[in-house]
């Protein structure tokens, strides 16, 4: 598994935009994947992170707004 806290060059994280993150979490739980990190939950988006079998961090994000300035506020 890759050390995601280090500064190693290369891919460590990638993300997919989904329509319903809660339904996706249930589907992945049914086949044995557990949420590694509960990401943001706010009025603009919510996200969940999983670690794939190769050690990559995979984020699934559901946007709750179509306004770009609201979607991209990562605090």
Image (cartoon, rainbow, N blue to C red):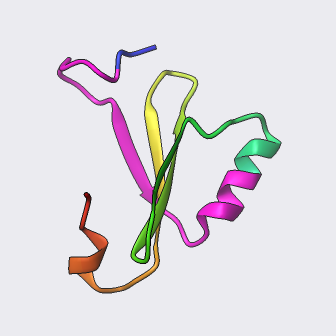
**Is residue 73 depicted above or below 43 in this figure?**
above
Which of 7/31 is in front? 7
Q: How many labels does the image show?
A: 0
User: In which image quadrant can residue 4 be found?
Assistant: top left
- Judge whether 46 appears above or below 67 on screen: above
Residue 34: x and y in percent read 67, 36
Q: In which quarter of the image is the C terminus?
A: bottom left
- Which residue corresponds to the image point at 20% horizontal and 79% vertical from the top-left? 69
The residue under the point 61% across, 40% down is 35
Q: Give the range drawn in magenta.
A: 4-26
- On the picture, is 8 further left or further right than 25? left
Magenta span contains residue 12: yes
In-image side of 58 versus 26 (left or right)? left
- Residue 58 in percent (x, y) is at 46, 41
Residue furthest out toward the right = 30
Give yes or no for residue 33 being in the magenta stretch.
no
Q: Position of residue 63 (x, y in %)?
A: 43, 73
Image position of 3 with respect to 28: above or below: above
Q: Where is residue 73 in the image (x, y as percent from the top left)?
A: 24, 67
Query: Where 60 sits versus 14, above or below?
Result: below
Could you tell whether 30 is left or right of 33 in the image? right
Residue at the (26%, 59%) spot, across then down: 74
Q: Which residue is drawn at 30% across and 22% down?
A: 5
């Amino acid at each position: 598994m890759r050390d995601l806290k280090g500064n190693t060059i290369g891919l460590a994280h990638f993300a997919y935009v989904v329509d319903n993150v809660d339904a996706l979490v249930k589907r992945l739980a049914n086949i044995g994947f557990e949420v590694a990190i509960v990401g943001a939950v706010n009025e603009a988006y919510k996200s969940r992170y999983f670690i794939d079998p190769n050690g990559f961090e995979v984020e699934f994000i559901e946007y709750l707004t179509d306004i770009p300035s609201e979607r991209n506020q990562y605090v």
